[in-house]
């Protein structure tokens, strides 16, 4: 029986297992192994980040189609609009793929900083919306006015009264001599009583970092009216938290926001036309059904939003608002897959070939060997218990000086082999006991990547990411696995979890390569990744499919080399180069020929990245 690693739970039919490999469920269904080997055959080593733009398009189409269906079902007259929050992934090959995938959808971008706003101004198609959230100074607001005067449909979301005061001042500056003033639209972020759930729930509620209270909302309304800018008030905005696992809190927030919208409409905000529900549409990361996070479908999400807005508009006798979303994780997460090779299995010493049995062994060691040799399905549980008893006795004998180091080593290896054999023979029997025993024999897989660089949310937030081997899938995995990255930090580990175990294959990595893939890594992980130990962004590749369904590697961006990384940290790499060269040239330990050889090797290594090539001899 082969394991599917929960692919049917988190995979959204984006990948399938065919024979021995996990394959992209698109075009001619190439395997991730074939794509990986294709890139490695071009000379690239270390971890690879594979981008699949067709999965960006799939998510955008799913989102828009769900709301189109809901609008049709409920005869909703408001429009559906969407923008992508750049904070989720600002990398150019993602953003370019996003804009290409969303062509024809009038899909825009959301910016939360000046740099992001520049990206939005350059990349957003004319006519598609740009929203600007977060705290803003005069320069950032001025950039928005430049965007508006360039023809962009841009909305500045007010986070506080002082921002509105600055917007008014900049408006006077930019339109002082203009008979036909042009200014960005204005949105008001409202600080709802309603909150989400989970670790991002603080994004909503009265204690939220962002948004206007009811009193500030009225004050802002009056300021806009006095300054004759009320026609620029186009949107109300709220956000109750990222990764909403349950739909209930959103329904409550929609009712609250909908009533605030209706109140402002009835006060005279005639051009107020939209409610922006923010992001939060969840992604299912779990590989086990008991740990599933999201309790709703995308269709249910769209139906609930549209129905709630329609009911409030009907009850309050106001126009049905356009609905904006800023879903980022949902759009971006699935498009990227991190593939990394396993460098070493640290438990490989627990093999029969590692035994150092003597001609005459201590009786308990001899009994362990006989238990291992004669174990079968009928006696596996009994022999397992005997072996664990023998282990405690033999360790006590070692502490008392009655057996030597070879005897202790043989004891540990034999008990390890017996536990492994018992788990294999008993399979799902005595599941609880076997799960506990897996901790005893868990294998440490050293993987050529940095958790801090490529999976920072695992380290910082204990966010789980689906992980599975990309080949050997016709074989049943038997090794309870913990994963170690190559940083010199004890936190660089994905520990074994007996309740949701990761089982991998027993591979001799000296004879063949073994690749693991980490899925749903396209949201936040790249932009939050840190250069702990100066490991840089992995080599990335964009994988596209032609009309015949064949894949092609369109773009490869190699991981930075050592000097580039140091230069980014503002080291003077010229001085470093000079110092290294002079130390070799001034050395009295070697001759001139060897100096030239060392210099050649040095410059070769400086042109490489920090990831390991191999640790095998």
Image: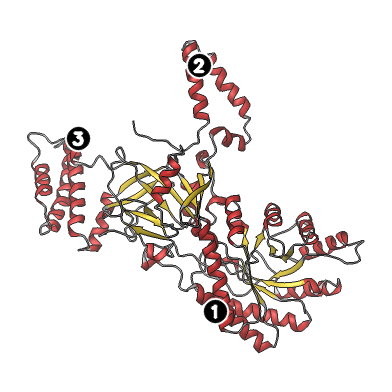
Give how far across and how far down residue 546 sits, in percent: 50, 55
Instruction: Name the residue rendered at 43%, 41% in the picture.
Output: 40
How many residues crowd around disc 2 within 10 Å: few (fewer than 14), some, or many (20 or more)? Answer: few
Instruction: Name the residue rendered at 61%, 86% in the picture.
Output: 311
Mark number for residue 596? 2
Q: Secondary structure at mark 1?
A: helix
* Spatial CA span between label 3 and label 1: 68 Å
Q: Are marks 2 and 1 in contact (CB under 8 Å)?
A: no
Q: Looking at the image, is mark 2 or mark 3 earlier in the sequence?
A: 3
Residue marked by disc 1: 303
Instruction: Name the residue rendered at 76%, 63% in the picture.
Output: 163
Q: Looking at the image, is mark 3 or mark 1 earlier in the sequence?
A: 1
Q: Looking at the image, is mark 2 or mark 1 earlier in the sequence?
A: 1
Q: From the viewer's perspective, is 75 left or right of 464?
A: right
As displayed, is residue 295 above or below residue 432? Answer: below
Q: Secondary structure at mark 3?
A: helix
* Spatial CA span between label 2 and label 1: 71 Å
Q: Quadrant of the N terminus?
A: bottom left
Q: Nearer the viewer, residue 307 or 379?
A: 307
Instruction: Name the residue rendered at 71%, 70% in the picture.
Output: 188
């Amino acid at each position: 029986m082969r394991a599917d690693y929960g692919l049917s739970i988190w995979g959204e039919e984006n990948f399938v297992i065919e024979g021995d490999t996990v394959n992209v469920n698109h075009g001619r269904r190439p395997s991730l192994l074939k794509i990986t080997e294709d890139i490695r055959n071009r000379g690239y080593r270390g971890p690879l980040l594979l981008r699949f733009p067709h999965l960006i398009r799939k998510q955008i189409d799913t989102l828009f189609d769900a709301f189109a269906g809901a609008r049709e079902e409920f005869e909703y007259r408001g429009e559906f609009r969407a923008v992508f929050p750049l904070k989720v992934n600002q990398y150019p090959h993602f953003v370019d793929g996003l804009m290409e995938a969303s062509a024809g959808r009038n899909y825009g971008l959301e910016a939360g900083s000046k740099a992001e706003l520049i990206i939005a101004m350059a990349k957003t198609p004319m006519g598609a919306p740009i929203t600007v959230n977060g705290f803003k100074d005069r320069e950032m607001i001025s950039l928005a006015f430049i965007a508006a005067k360039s023809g962009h449909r841009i909305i500045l979301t007010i986070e506080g009264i002082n921002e509105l005061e600055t917007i008014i001042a900049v408006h006077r500056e930019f339109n002082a001599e203009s008979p036909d003033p042009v200014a960005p639209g204005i949105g008001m972020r409202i600080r709802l009583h309603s909150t989400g759930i989970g670790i991002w729930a603080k994004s909503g509620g009265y204690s939220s970092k962002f948004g206007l209270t009811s009193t500030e909302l009225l004050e802002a309304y009056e300021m806009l009216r006095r300054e004759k800018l009320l026609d620029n008030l186009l949107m109300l905005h709220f956000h109750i938290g990222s990764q909403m696992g349950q739909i209930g809190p959103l329904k409550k927030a929609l009712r609250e926001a909908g009533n605030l919208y209706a109140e402002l409409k009835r006060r005279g905000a005639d051009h107020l036309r939209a409610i922006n529900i923010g992001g939060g549409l969840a992604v299912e990361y779990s590989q086990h059904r008991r740990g599933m996070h999201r309790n709703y479908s995308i269709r249910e999400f769209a139906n609930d939003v549209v129905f709630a807005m329609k009911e409030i508009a009907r009850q309050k006798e106001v126009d049905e608002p356009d609905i904006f979303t800023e879903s980022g994780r949902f759009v971006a997460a699935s498009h990227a897959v991190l593939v990394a090779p396993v460098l070493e299995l640290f438990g490989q010493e627990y093999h029969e070939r590692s035994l150092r049995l003597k001609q005459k062994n201590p009786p308990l060691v001899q009994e362990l060997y006989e238990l291992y040799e004669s174990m079968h399905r009928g006696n596996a549980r009994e022999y397992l218990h005997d072996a664990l008893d023998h282990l405690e006795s033999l360790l006590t004998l070692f502490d008392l000086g009655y057996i030597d180091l070879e005897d202790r080593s043989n004891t540990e290896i034999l008990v390890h082999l017996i536990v492994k054999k018992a788990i294999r023979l008993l399979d799902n029997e005595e599941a609880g006991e076997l799960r506990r025993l897996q901790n005893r024999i868990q294998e440490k897989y050293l993987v050529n990547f940095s958790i801090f660089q490529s999976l920072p949310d695992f380290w910082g937030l204990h966010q789980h990411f689906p992980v599975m081997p990309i080949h050997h899938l016709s074989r049943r995995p038997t090794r309870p696995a913990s994963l170690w990255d190559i940083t010199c930090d004890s936190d660089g580990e994905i520990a074994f979890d007996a309740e949701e175990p990761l089982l991998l294959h027993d591979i001799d990595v000296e004879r063949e390569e073994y690749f693991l893939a980490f899925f749903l890594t396209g949201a936040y992980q790249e932009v939050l990744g840190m250069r702990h130990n100066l490991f840089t962004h992995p080599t990335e590749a964009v994988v596209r499919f032609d009309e015949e369904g064949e894949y092609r590697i369109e773009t490869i961006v190699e991981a930075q080399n050592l000097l580039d990384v140091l230069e980014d940290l503002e080291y003077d790499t010229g001085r470093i180069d000079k110092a290294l060269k002079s130390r070799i040239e001034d050395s009295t330990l070697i001759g001139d020929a060897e100096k030239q050889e060392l210099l050649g090797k040095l410059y070769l290594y400086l042109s490489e990245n920090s990831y390991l090539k191999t640790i095998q001899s």
